[in-house]
Image: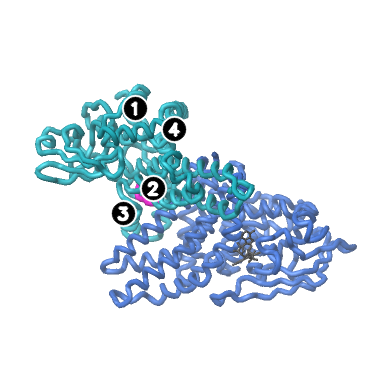
Chain colours: A cyan, B blue
Amino acid sequence: MDHLITEALRDLLTGQCTPAVVRAIESEAAASAGASPTAAALWQQIEDSGFADLLLSEDAGGAGLALRDAFAVWDLLGQHAMPLPLAETMLARAWLAAAGVALPQGAIALAPQLAAADGGLRASGVRGARVAPWVLGQHGADVLLLPVAAAQASASIFVLDADLHWPASAVVSATRVPAPASLLVAQAGLVSALLAGSLLTVFESTLNFANERQQFGRPIGKFQAIQHELAVMAEHVSAARMAAQIACEADGVVADPLKVAVGKARSSEAAVEVAALAHSIHGAIGFTTEFDLQLHTRRLHLWRQTAGSESYWQLQAGQALLAADGMALDVIRQITDSSAPVA
Amino acid sequence: MTILNGLALTRIPPEGEALRAEVRAFLQEAVKDIPAHIRAKSWSGYDPAFSRKLGEKGWLGMTFPKAYGGHEQGAFARYVVVEELLNFGAPVGSHWIAERQSAPLILKYGTEAQKQRYVPPVARGESFFCIGMSEPNAGSDLASVRTRAVPNDGGWLLNGQKIWTTNAEHCQYMIALVRTSGEPADRQKGLSQLIVDLSLPGVTVRPIEDMSGDRHFCEVFFDNVQLAPDALVGAEGQGWEQVTAELAYERSGPERLFSSVVLLDQWLAFVRSEAAPRADSIKLAGQILTRLAPLRALSVAVQEKLVQGQSPIVEAALVKDQGTVLEQFIPAAIADDLMAREGEGEAVPHALLLTLNYLTLVSPCYTLRGGTRSILRGMIARGLGLR
Ligand SMILES: Cc1cc2nc3c(=O)[nH]c(=O)nc-3n(C[C@H](O)[C@H](O)[C@H](O)COP(=O)(O)OP(=O)(O)OC[C@H]3O[C@@H](n4cnc5c(N)ncnc54)[C@H](O)[C@@H]3O)c2cc1C
């Protein structure tokens, strides 16, 4: 992965995707059902810097990154609680460009499970749909590029998401794209990487807090009970980050379903544990809107609930393991060491 | 932050993989008649003839210098061999500690004469060592050991007692951590490591039975045991530093992930044989896989750091603690799964229940041996700068 790209992105996020900006985008979206000037400004910065095109080939104006390289980018987006569907847009643009479809302007949210409804299509809980003009959705074998403006939108649980219903007319005129793979697998893979980043930030801020917050005359991090909770957090974070790297381990822009199953299941498990321990260690302050922790722990739960929870992916992984004959080690090697020939 | 950020997905290099197929073919033949509940003993299975066979194959002392009977292969080549041995449940217990820990310690701190004398027989699978650290009143608090060696005209006069010494009954030598100067109150100061020939007069070894009925660890008593001057490994008073380095070898290998893998494979074979596997079983298989695979990747990443000459003590502790907890989860979860099908479908094979029962009874030791869970968490906290 090109160090310059991640350093440039880190600079952009540190300057432009601050907790204040994340808050502003969330509250503007809540107040006006979508039109957020802060979101528009952040998106423009991203667009101007070319980060949404990193997965496009160099011919098409991108950087020709593979999913394996995208991990470092998505990890950073997770670390900064990115409130716009940038990771999703990177992937959608790569798929669209590969299919020869002209790229639309603006962010693209993902809806991997479109359902038929009243002659049209609907999707619930589309992540980032309040701050994106487009949705790339999958309905059976079809992948469609749908404008958000053509849908009837209603509020979802998370403020930046929406439940969408496209009437038949909008579906008929949507751009159809040959699907290179399952959009659910693709989304689960990138969400694993977002979780990896968010887990790291939650862990680091909890560690800092434990070193600063004083009770009984010393930092709470000096108490063995707190030390052990932080050690357990570190274990979950290290395993989840490794699992997310596995999920993104691919040469091109199509993820391996079994690797994604490992990444999404393990990072989702970690999300629940780490969020709970972080809140426990932060005491009452961490429970407030004003304190930044919630920007991340809400996302840990949200991303865990995106593109299949741990149970869903454990079931997929279990099917693969049972379908393979021989030793579990061989499946593990296929997952973690894919260049090795299977003996 | 480097500890959580610095472990990158790493592939075992091709030169590391080179031996896998040959080792596997050998093991398929070698263990085919050993029942699963015996293979499940993993690295506590004792069979000196098997160790000698591995020595003949060149699969012991793989990373040692040729001058001392080694094969000067990369650490990943050894990793692959060890991983296959553990996954097949090969009886590697006789040589395990000597090859993993004692010989590398002697190679690092020993005199030329000690290296020539002790290391080549380890690489041949003929010489077995045990570790004498724990005592009845020095477990987690290892710096409080009381066993004492007093310098005299003949070398060292040794008195005291060790406990929980794995395989002492079958070993020729112990590397003992003992007090050579000062008082127990001096803690880490004044400790040294001595090579004790267990056939000397005054040494008594008494096996202790564990709750599964196995006898693998022992009490060892020293009653005026006269040791030669060259029993000392490394420098007098440096025992603590040496032991700390030694424990890093002990904690970084795949043996902290795969202790329950024979049961896992046996259970998977049973579930595959069922006409319609339960959804819960499939999910459990996936839960174990999605926890085990990232840990194996972490263990390989730690190995890579060792190869690069770094000392990833905290990373090794992160892997060991998670690995041993997963090793304990596997028998508990499989028992739950098997007993959830009471009265339906095929009867659970007796052989599978035997393995399950064995692992249920020994698995408490996974989070004790090599340092307890609490001690490892303390090490992680130290690595995070909290203490
Ligand atoms: C199968 C097996 C093989 C072994 N093989 C060997 C061997 O070959 N050689 C050898 O020398 N030893 C060996 N051991 C011993 C092993 O290293 C010790 O059991 C271990 O260090 C724990 O010591 P202990 O049993 O005295 O428990 P204790 O130290 O008494 O601990 C009891 C409990 O208190 C906790 N505790 C203790 N101190 C602290 C603290 N500061 N903070 C928080 N919690 C604490 C522990 O975590 C544990 O939960 C073996 C043990 C087993 C089970």
Q: Amino acid at mark 2?
A: Gly
Circle 4 — which element? Answer: loop
The amino acid type, in three-letter code, at marker 4 is Met
Dominant SS in magenta:
helix
Tag 1: amino acid: Thr
The answer to whether residue B26 of the structure is visible from this angle is no
The Cα–Cα distance between marks 2 and 4, rounded to whole angstroms, is 20 Å
Q: Residue B150 occupies which quadrant of the picture?
A: bottom right
Chain ID, mark 2: A
- Spatial separation of the CA atoms under disc 2 and disc 3: 12 Å
Quadrant in the picture for the N terminus of chain B: top right
> Mark 1 or mark 2, which has the lower sequence index?
1
Residue B79 drawn in magenta: no
Query: Circle 1 — which element?
Result: helix
Relative vertical location of residue B58 with respect to residue B4 in this rendering, above or below: below
Q: Nearer the viewer, residue A32 or B40?
A: A32
Residue B23 x %, y %: 49, 57
Residue A263 within the magenta-colored segment of the rendering: yes
Foreground mark, 4 or 1?
Answer: 1
Mark 3 sits near ligand 1, with its Cβ under 8 Å away = no
Give the class, few, some or many, for how many residues have Cα within 10 Å of label 1's Cα (few <14, many ≥20): some
- Pointer 2: what residue? A263
Q: Earlier in the sequence, mark 2 or mark 3?
A: 2
